[in-house]
Structures are given as C-alpha cells and as structure tokens.
Image (cartoon, rainbow, N blue to C red):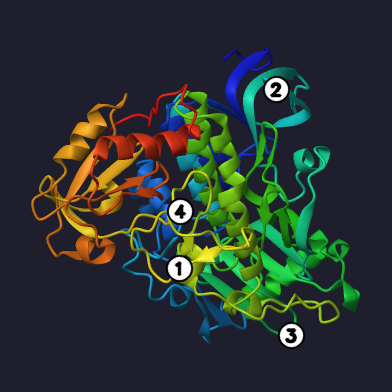
Amino acid sequence: MGAHGDTVEVPVLIVGAGAGGLTAAAVLAKHGVESLVVEQRQELFRYPKARNLSFRSLEILRGLGLSDAAHAVGASVSDMVMKPSLDSTEETPGLDVGVIFQGLENVSPEPPVLYCPQSRLEPLLLEFLRDHSSRAWYGTALVALEQDDNGAHAIVCDRTSGRRTHVRAGYVIAADGVHSGIRTSLGITTSGYGPLPIYVATIYFRAPWRTVMPHLHDGASVGIKNEAVDGVFVPAEGDLAMFIAPYLPTQGETAADFTDRRCRALLRAALGRSIDVEIMEITTWQPYERVADQFRCGRVFFVGDAAHAMPPFKAGGANVAIQSADNLAWKLAAVLQACAGPLLLDTYHSERHPIGALSAHQSLTGPPAALLRTDPQRPPPHLDHEVSMFALLIGYRYRSAAIIRSDPHPANAAAPELVDALRGQPGTRVPHTWVEHQGRRVSTLDLLGTGFTLLTGDDNGAWEAASRSLEPALTVRAIGRGGDALDVAGSWADVTRLTPRQAILVRPDAFIAWRSSPEPTNPADALHDALASLLNHNDPSQPPRPGHRN
C-alpha cells in the first residue's frame, strides 16, 4: 500500500473504526489479510462508551491473543448505585448488571460480562491490526464509492488537509453507523421501530470529581436524582467524566436547552457542590432499533450499526457488532486467499441477519430499558416474549450453506433458531469444557486453530490420515481419555455425546460446520465432501483448502 494521498490497492476497505470495523480489521489481519480502515473521527474515543463486553465478544478477543489485555482494564462488570448527589452519603442499589448475566458462568472460559469500554477496546484492536500490516486512517472521510464485478473504487479525503486518495479494494465493509451513508447510497432498505422515544444529552467534562467520591472505581456509574437534575454520572480516565441527562421534547425540552451555562448548573446539582469544571463537549443522542434488510450489496457488506442498530442494553450494540464482524472476516479471508468460493460470502446475511434482528428487538426489554425515562406519548414497542440471556448471547443456531445439517430447516428461514443447550449441533458455537492439554488446563475453544479444526474422539487415526490428504492440513485435536486433550472429568463426552470414532468440524469463528456420522465408513471421503460443500459449494474444479494450520 502506498502513502496517504497516493492511489492505493488493498484487499478490504473498512469505513468506520468503531467496535465492528476494528474487529473486522483485526480478524482479517489474524487470517493474513490486509485492510485499510478510514474513520471520520480525528482520534480514538476518550470516554467509556459501550462499556461491557459479553463472554462471546471476549472469546473473539481471546482468539486474537487479547484476552489478558482486556482483563487488565479493570472491574469485572459495571454496576450502578443511586444517590441524590455525588457527594451524598445516601446510597441505594441501582442496576446490578451481574444479575442479568446470572447462570452463564459455565458457558465460556470467559466471564459472562466484563467491563471493557470502547475507549479501552479500540486501542487494543488498533494496535493489533497495525502490528499485522494493516492501516487505520483517522480524520478521513469517504467521499465516493463505486463497485463493479472486479472490485470497488473509493475516494477518501483527509479532513484536515483536503487531500484525496483513490482506493481500489476487493471488498468494502461499511461500518459507518446507524445513519450509514453507504447503505443509503446503495438503496438498502431497513426495518424496525426506527428512532426510539429516548432523548439523551451527554456532557463530557474535566473536573476534580474524585475529591467528591474518591472510591468510585472504573466501570461503576451513579444514577443521580434530585429536584434539579435527573441523570447518570459515569467516570472516565483521570479527572475526565461524563454526565448523561435525558430530556423530553414533548414536554418542551430540546437539545438546544443544553447550553454551557445550563450544563454547568446541572453538573453542580449532580456533584452536590461547586468545583471547577471544564466542559469538553456536549452531544445529544437518540437510539434506534433498525436492521438493514440486506447485509450485503455486491462487494459491500454492512457491519455494526449500519447493519443492526439497537440501544446498548442487554449486551447489544457493540457486542453484536463484534460478533458479526468475526463472522464476516474469516469468510472474506477464505475467499480472498482462494480457500473458498465466492458463494460463501452470501452466508454472512443468512447467518447474521436473524441474530441481528433478534438482538435489536430484544434490546428493548429487561431492567436496563426500564430504567430509562421515555416519552409517554410515544412509548417503546411492547414485546410479548423476552428470550433468555443464554438464547440471546449464544443459544442460537445458524442455517446457511456454510453449515451441513441433517435435520430439516424450519419453514421460516428469516426467524432465528434457538437452542436450550450447546451439544455439538452443527450451526452452534462449539461447547466449552475444561480439558488438559500439554499439561495445562485449557478450554476446548483454546484447541481451535486459525482455520478449520477437526475435534475427534480417542480413535482418531483415520481422521489424522484424512487431514493429511488436504493442503494445508487441518488442525486435528483428539479429546478423550487417551487423546492429546484429556477429558479428565468426562464433561466433553457428556455434552457432545461423540463416539470414539466420530468428529465435528469447527469453523474459524468457533461454530460447528459439520458433524460426522457416529461410525464413519470412510473418514477421508466424508471429510473431503464436507469441506468441498462448505467452502466451494460442490464446485469440482476446486479442491477443498480449509485454511492455515496453527
């Protein structure tokens, strides 16, 4: 790639450097694919937006080698207390985020939820992608985009200098937000409630607030309500903080009311005393429940809020963006590296659209949504059915051409298919159990390679031989009493019910693509046919190439 300002060529152009865009770039980099990320913002977020990561997002970071860095951020979960002012000794419980995730402690090697806000997550992902030869240009806007059968041509502009760069890319990931200009320009329609009756002003400020409440830790927040103010105080790094204040247009309140003078008065009332305050920025926000009707248009794919916008409740928002980016990135890498046919890319919409729609709808339910002050003249939509957090976060099953299933597909392909447990079913995330590998206690998720992985029973000699017939060879792990991963407690066998001669094929995103018959007569042929179907859609001119081996 050339210098900023030249005509550059790159396999993937990513527009937007939020959680979805940066995750897509990082996962592409993990698979050896360069990308260029362009972002209108001049810098990374400095404030704790999108604060909690669910275990599934943490698993994706774990696969990137970033788990320790994420855990080093701080508190295990953000919590909230209620006070009449920040300096008051009166305190009552507010929102206990941990309770929302109860019962999920054994689903993953990661905790159910972890405080790692976007202000801390973005630098981790940015460093990773840059260390792997990809680029991110901040202060850079997309000004034009065209596509043809061979790729996409974009023009981006440095917002400071005005200098323009032509970018030729194989594919484009549009991670440009809820009001996606790319989605609009391509004529992609959306569905959903649209703008929600929730209106919020956020005051970003600097002040010695820790002299008022020194014990407030990273990840915590304080709901403040008194005669003069009703809002939420959120600490940031050092003496930075933010105060979130709702307002209701139907009661004559407007965004224009939040002048510098009024914001200072609100902060004094919230803090409970007069201290020196430097207001950095005042912004307004209205959440949307909106899902693109198509996640793909030619060589352009939609990720994050451009695909599925929702309020950040119940681990929605950034978490769903991260998981959709992970789903798309390995598929793009497989196609760009000629390991798969281009039809694989159609499965991004097939798999993630039902989950994006489910997450968006369900984000309007539960305790976090109930805490918000909403417009009584336009209440949020009422949902008759609230699914469990297990179902919402991991208890779903993909249906697509990238999954081989023997059971019939449900009649409504657009509806998400939910399961009550992960038992090694094709289309679900591989079950997590603890095993012993090379003298260490590891998760079954830690056994997965960068490409496809074959998890077998003890009697895996035929599968090892079948793997060696592929180029490059698959990662093969035998889990059992005598395998290279010891199922010491028998948990893996109990959960999956695999026979000693059976195997499951796991995709690079940790979802199960295929499950062999209990007593395969010819493992080599079965594995070859499965990979040919998954990667090339039975195109006999292309031998299966499952990807890199760790």
Q: Where does the N terminus fall, quadrant-wise?
A: top right
Give the residue at mark 4.
57
Q: CA distance from mark 4 to mark 3?
A: 40 Å
Residue mark closest to the camera, 2 vs 4:
2
Q: CA distance from mark 2 to mark 4?
A: 34 Å
For disc 4, the neighbor class at 10 Å (few under 14, some 14 to 19, many from 20) is: many
The image position of residue 95, as x and y in percent, is 53, 78
Q: Quadrant of residue 314?
A: bottom right
Q: CA distance from mark 3 to mark 1?
A: 47 Å
Point 33% across, 63% down: residue: 423
Q: CA distance from mark 4 to mark 1?
A: 20 Å
Mark closest to the chain's N terminus, 1 or 2:
2
Mark closest to the chain's N terminus, 3 or 1:
3
Residue mark closest to the camera, 3 vs 1:
1
From the viewer's perspective, tell me whether residue 487 is left or right of residue 137: left
Give the residue at mark 3.
227
Q: Amino acid at mark 2?
A: Asp
